[in-house]
Image: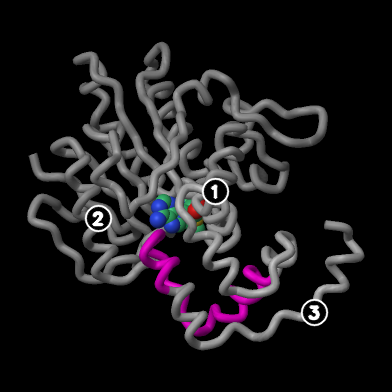
Amino acid sequence: MQPSAVWAMKPLPDITAAEFRAWQELLETRSGMVLNEQRRAFLQTTLGKRLRELGLDSYASYYQQVTDGPRGAVEWSHLMDRLTVQETRFFRHPASYEYLAGYLRERLEQLERGRAWQLWSVGCSSGEEAYSLAVVAAEVQREAGLEGRRFGVTGTDLSLSALARAREGRYGARRVGELPAELLERYFLDQSDGSYQVCESLRERVCFARLNVLELERAPQRGMDVIFCQNLLIYFRRWRRREILSRLVERLVPGGLLVIGVGEVADWRHPQLQPVADERVLAFTRKG
Ligand SMILES: C[S@@+](CC[C@H](N)C(=O)[O-])C[C@H]1O[C@@H](n2cnc3c(N)ncnc32)[C@H](O)[C@@H]1O
C-alpha cells in the first residue's frame, strides 16, 4: 500500500466491549496471557497499528484473519510479538543467580560421574536469562578447574522474533553494561559497531526453541537439573500458574532446582518439592 493510502484511511472506531472480550479470550486461550481492562487501550493501539499496516478497516476482519487456520497462524505469531512483554536483562534478580551458583557448586561431583548439567530458561525472551545461566554454570566449572564445559542450556519462548535475537546473541553496550567487567571480558567479544557478541564457546552450549508453556506436555525437555521460570507466570491466572509449575516439576531430575520469580506464586506447595532455605529467592528442589 502507498503511504498516502495509509493516511487516507478513516480513523478506526474504539474497540467495542464485545470485541475486547473476544480478543481477551483468544489471547488467553492461545497464550495464557490475561489482558485486563487497564490494557484495553494498549490492545486497541496495537491492533490498530497492525490493521493499518495490512490495509484492513475493522477489528472483526483482522480477528477473522488471525483465526483462519494455518494462514492465520503466521499473522498470530506477528501479533504475539507485539502483545507479549519481552522485557528482560542479564542476571535479572541477582539473588536467584547467586543461589544457583551455590547450588551448582554442591553438584560438581555429578560431573565426575560423566553427567553434564542441563539448564532450562522457560520464557527466555531475547536470551539474556539463558546466557546468564550459561555464564554461571561456566564460572562454577572454571573455578573448580574443570576443562571444557559440561553443561547445556535450553531457552524456550513463544515469540519467534525474541528467539531470533536470542540465537544471534549480540547485545548493545547498555544491555551488557551491568555485567561485572571480568564476566564481560571472559564471555563476550566487543564488536566494531559497539555491540557485544556472546563468545562462541558459550554460545555453542546454548540452544533456543519455540515452545508455548500451555503445551508443555509436548515439550521434549526432560531430566533438567535447573529450571528458571521468572517473569512469565505473572501474566497468567493463578490456577494456570500452578498447572504449569506442576508440569515443570515433572521435567526436573530428583534433586533438581526450580526457580520462580519472587511473588509469582503465593502459598504454592508441591508434594515433590522442598522449598530452599533462602528467603531472597522463590526456589524449590525436587525430592530424591
Ligand atoms: C517478561 S519476559 C521474561 C523474560 C525472562 N524470563 C526474564 O525474567 O527476564 C516474558 C516472556 O515470556 C514469553 N511468553 C509469554 N507467553 C508465553 C507462552 N504462553 N509460552 C512461552 N513463552 C511465553 C514472552 O514472549 C516473553 O519473552
Please tell me which of labels 1 and 2 falls first in the chain: 1
Residue 126: mark: none
Disc 1: CA contacts within 10 A as few (<14), some (14-19) or many (>=20): few
- Where does residue 215 sit, x and y in percent of width and height? 30, 49
In the image, taking residue 231 as reference, residue 19 lies left or right, namely right
**Residue 93 seen in the figure:** no
Q: Which residue is mark 1?
A: 74
Disc 2: CA contacts within 10 A as few (<14), some (14-19) or many (>=20): some
In the image, taking residue 222 as reference, residue 79 lies left or right, namely right
Q: Specify the amino acid type for callout 3.
A: Lys
User: What segment is highlighted magenta in the picture?
Assistant: 25-48
Please tell me which of labels 3 and 2 falls first in the chain: 3
The residue depicted at 24 percent of the width and 69 percent of the height is 239
Query: How far is the residue under mark 1 from the one under mark 2?
Result: 28 Å
Q: Which residue is mark 3?
A: 10
**Helix or strand or loop: what does disc 2 sit on?**
helix
The residue depicted at 16 percent of the width and 38 percent of the height is 255
In the image, taking residue 129 as reference, residue 52 lies left or right, namely right
Q: Residue furthest right?
A: 4
Q: Specify the amino acid type for callout 1.
A: Val
Q: Specify the amino acid type for callout 2.
A: Leu
- Where does residue 171 sit, x and y in percent of width and height? 67, 39
**Helix or strand or loop: what does disc 3 sit on?**
loop
Q: Are marks 1 and 2 in contact (CB under 8 Å)?
A: no
Does the numbered disc 2 mark a residue whose Cβ is under 8 Å from ligand 1? no
Specify the quadrant that holds the C terminus.
top left
Picture quarter containing residue 200?
top right
